[in-house]
Amino acid sequence: SYQREPLSLNLLYNVFGRRIGDVGVLGLPDVFEEEVHSLDLTGAYQLSDHLSVSANLKNLLLQPLRFTQGNFDFKRIDRGVSFGIRFGLTY
């Protein structure tokens, strides 16, 4: 039978470029969501044949979401780092 490793760790890097968040109206310029780099860490551990635990940390680079309209900052969202944990039970 296939035996999988009990521990898995993943470091994930993602980047997306500038993209339109809202289309400008009444002659106003479009609102753009500016480039964002993200670094996330996920891990899972198989405690037994039926029990597992996994956790994740997101936004390790502390990148805010920044929106601009023309030459002005329209909105900024400071997200901070988020953490999640999950337990799994299978039969």
Image (cartoon, rainbow, N blue to C red):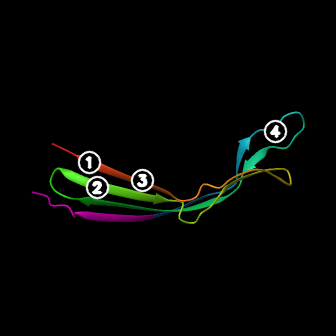
* Disc 4, SS: loop
Look at label 1 and name its amino acid.
Gly
> Which kind of residue does numbered mark 4 sit on?
Gly
Instruction: Determine contact: label 1, label 2, CB under 8 Å.
Output: yes
Between marks 2 and 4 in the image, the one whose residue lies nearer the viewer: 2
The image's mark for residue 53 is 2
Compared across the picture, whether 16 is left or right of 50 comes to right
Find out whether the residues at labels 3 and 4 contact each other: C-beta distance under 8 Å: no
Q: Indicate the position of residue 76 as horizontal and vertical percent values.
A: 72, 52
State how far apart marks 2 and 4 are (Cα). Answer: 46 Å
In the rendered structure, does residue 35 fall within the stretch colored magenta?
no
Residue 59 shown left or right of residue 5 in the figure: right
Is residue 81 shown above or below 75? below
Indicate which disc residue 24 carries.
4
Q: x%, y% of residue 57?
A: 46, 60
Q: Which residue is mark 3?
A: 84
Which region of the structure is painted magenta? 1-11
